[in-house]
Amino acid sequence: MLHFQKWKLILVFGVVLAGFIFSIPNLIPASTLQELPSWVPKKQVNLGLDLQGGAHLLYQIDEKELVEDWLGTIRGDVRETLRTSRIGYTDLTLNVAGRSVSVRIRKPEDMDKAVTELKKLAVPIGNDVFGGFSGYDLEVTRNGSDGVTLAVTEPGLNNRISAAIQASIETIRRRVDAFGTTEPSIQRQGRNRILVQVPGVSDVERLKGLIGETGKLEFKLVDPSANAAEVAASKKVPPGDELVYSSDDPPVPYVLKDQVLVSGENLVDAQPGFDSRTGEPVVTFRFDAAGAKRFGRVTQENVGLPFAIVLDNKVISAPVIREPILGGTGQISGNFSVQEANDLSVLLRSGALPAKLTVIEERTVGASLGADSIESGKKAAIAGLVLVVVFMFLAYGLFGLFANLALIINIAMIFAVLSLMGATLTLPGIAGIVLVIGIAVDANVLINERIREEIRSGKSPFAAVDAGYARALTTIIDSNVTTLIAVLVLFWLGSGPVRGFAVTLTIGILTSMFTAVTVTRMMVAYWLRRARPKFVPI
Amino acid sequence: MFRGITLIPPDTKIDFVGQRAITWLVSAFLTVVPLFLVATIGLNMGIDFQGGTLIEVQTKESPANLSDIRSKISGLGLGEVQIQEFGAPNAVLIRIASQPKEEEQQASIAKVKGALGDTVEYRRTEIVGPTISSELISGGTVAVVVALLGIMIYVWFRFEWQFAVAAVASLVHDVTATIGLYALLQLEFNVSSIAAILTIIGYSLNDKVVIFDRIRENLRKYKRMPLVKLLDLSINEMLSRAVLTHVTTFLAMLPFLFFGGEAIYGFAVAMCFGIVIGAYSSIFVASPMQLILGVRREAFSASTESAKGPAKDPAKGRAGAAAGA
């Protein structure tokens, strides 16, 4: 046990050295690190949101709304299909709870044809690993002698949710990127959730406003024949019209024609700017060819009448069309501040979210609290380390020194592994490192106590040390494996800070097996061979 | 040369297990009282498990004018609101009860920010909606149960079923005692409390395995020794190690109580307590339970000459060291 082959010595020495080399960047400020030559390792430990400040936002997509929208589309498709194939129908109804659309066919002889035609609406979905066929998104069934039901299938719904989540992630990414923070992380979580983590953000309310807004832009005509105040009071909306309020406080009612002239999908660009006459902040936008053509035609036909720009069912502004807008560009003014104009342009550029997103969990930490946590974590960890080092020396003398040296190597290795893996250090993570100090020292305590026992049983220094290491090892492995089981559960359960704790603890337990056992054994072996002691000072 | 101080003399012979009539009572007390505390005082459930909103602010003046903040917020119609000092005289924690809908939860933060304006610095905000809080409760419970089961299987595999049962029983003792501490001190019970409990489970078990290991070794060594004596011998042999390890881990954790900051205070309290209770239960719960469960000596004496025996350990040692490197 005490004889080491040369290659092994070199290997261990190399690993220890690598531990120090890769942990050192953490002691150097990032700005200084940047100026060093490229061969110098530069990776530092990522700090968790609780240490550097930032926002953790968990969004959930509104599944009900998604289903409702989808059923609405299906109803439209059914109407269209039956009309084009000249099949008479009645009772076209939408059942949100049953996730289905049902219809009655007037003539029994049309039933077969209707079912055949409606079955064409179902789209095959290939969502297994090989991209193969795994069913249809709709199930079309006969319902009695004259009814047909189109029900959304489970795989179809999952597919839809996945697509909506993907699209939302893209949209959110564009919005957060425009916010100008470093390294935001946006990822899907579970079936219908998106986790957004933005480090170092200070104005969380603005960030949330930007992410959570659906961003559905519509241009609609104002119904000039209706009196908005009267309609708002009586709630009697003329057919073909809708009552929409402005985003002002108090909201101003508008009666709009419910037909959408042009929507946000036809936008190709939106930029913040200033009105050339009044100098107030505005958002200028540009339509694609189709949008420009439609917008041109509508404005031509309605000169002198007001139209409304509606964002997420709120009227932003309702200007009067002074002249036809044929070039496909225009501007939105609505008493914006510069920041509001900027945010609105980001919203329009990034496109609309496919469904409403709701924040179901939010955790934000201010930068100053993060800095305070780093400070207090550091202080507590160093104090803990000093206490342990002093205590170990008092308890074991020279062998305590060996253990202490191994402990410092262990801490360096934890930081090296954390840096190389790109793992995240959180405040509980710092506490995890401290706990590792306890566990690592325990290994040396077990070894040293065993050596004491072996000496008492009358063994020579060499034999006692040898047996001490050999006998203690099974105990160390057993005890560490059991701790690891609990820690792995923690990793699997936890998120954010708690996971950070599990990460440092796992890494630390693994590296401590190397430093507390292998490294100290080499030190002890070297000392035994050099000093040739008559007795072991332990 | 300085050889270190021996805290526990090598020939210490305390009859830990011999005194089991008394220690069983203590252990029962440590298990029943926490349950009583939880039932009567109850746990100070944090927003993780209850849902709700938490805002930590720092006021410009020190100490903070709590009544002023309270009057500004109480008029907002947010239901139950708790306002308390948090760690420093100018740090204030505002807790708002869960609102029925996720959107209202969001609105509550905006309302508080509107009411307090720029007079304070917002250090931390947390909103946990009803969906997440119920998931965290079930997730936390599952985690503790899975951890206990995993440990039971491992210990069963490495030792005998009696050891596995004894380990899990004493861990349950540790967990209830720790939860009792949360109730007694009214520390906030949240996700990091579950982390603390799982860590205590891991640490405490570590300690039990060390003693079990020695019991197993002694069962092989002293085939005729009565079990009570053998258990006491094993505990006494490992006493020096236990004291040293627990003192070092405790010392390492202790500074977090004083300068770790409020965010980790509850965790540090639980960990410090867990180290003590884990040490206690290794000696006074896990070991004497072997008497009740009746360890089969044949299980160990038969394997002395087999591959499981300590003679083979050096070979294992090399494998372990290589894996560590």
Image: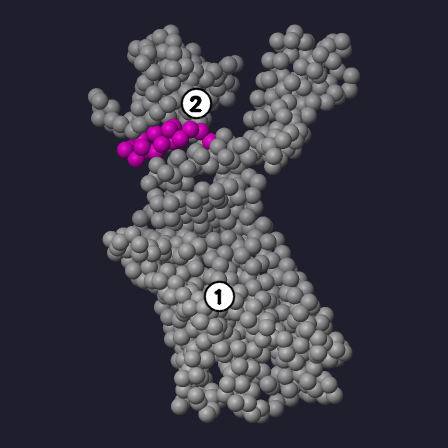
- Residue nearest the viewer, comparing B141 with B119: B141
| Residue at x 37% of width, y 23% of height | A268
| Residue at x 70% of width, y 15% of height | A116
Question: From this viewpoint, is residue B82 visible?
Answer: no
Q: Which residues are magenta?
A: A335-353
Residue extending farthest to the front is A6
Left or right, residue A41 beside residue A215: left
Find disc 1 in the rendering and name its residue.
B325
Magenta region includes residue B26: no
Left or right, residue A491 beside residue B232: left
- Residue nearest the viewer, comparing B62 with A197: A197
Question: From this viewpoint, is residue A214 visible?
Answer: yes
Q: Amino acid at mark 1?
A: Ala
Q: Amino acid at mark 2?
A: Glu
Left or right, residue A55 beside residue B282: left
Find disc 2 in the rendering and name its residue.
A265
Q: Horizontal and vertical percent for residue A318? A: 36, 20
- Residue nearest the viewer, comparing A494 with B207: B207
| Residue at x 51% of width, y 83% of height | A465
Q: Quadrant of residue A28?
A: bottom left
Q: Residues within 10 Å of mark 2 (few under 14, many from 20)?
A: some
| Quadrant (top left/top right/bottom left/bottom right) for the N terminus of chain B | bottom left
Relative to residue B219, is residue A495 depicted above or below? above
- Residue A397's disc is none
Q: Horizontal and vertical percent for residue B41? A: 58, 65
Q: Horizontal and vertical percent for residue B315? A: 59, 73
- Choose mark 2 or mark 1, whichever is in front: 1
Does label 1 lie on the same chain as label 2?
no
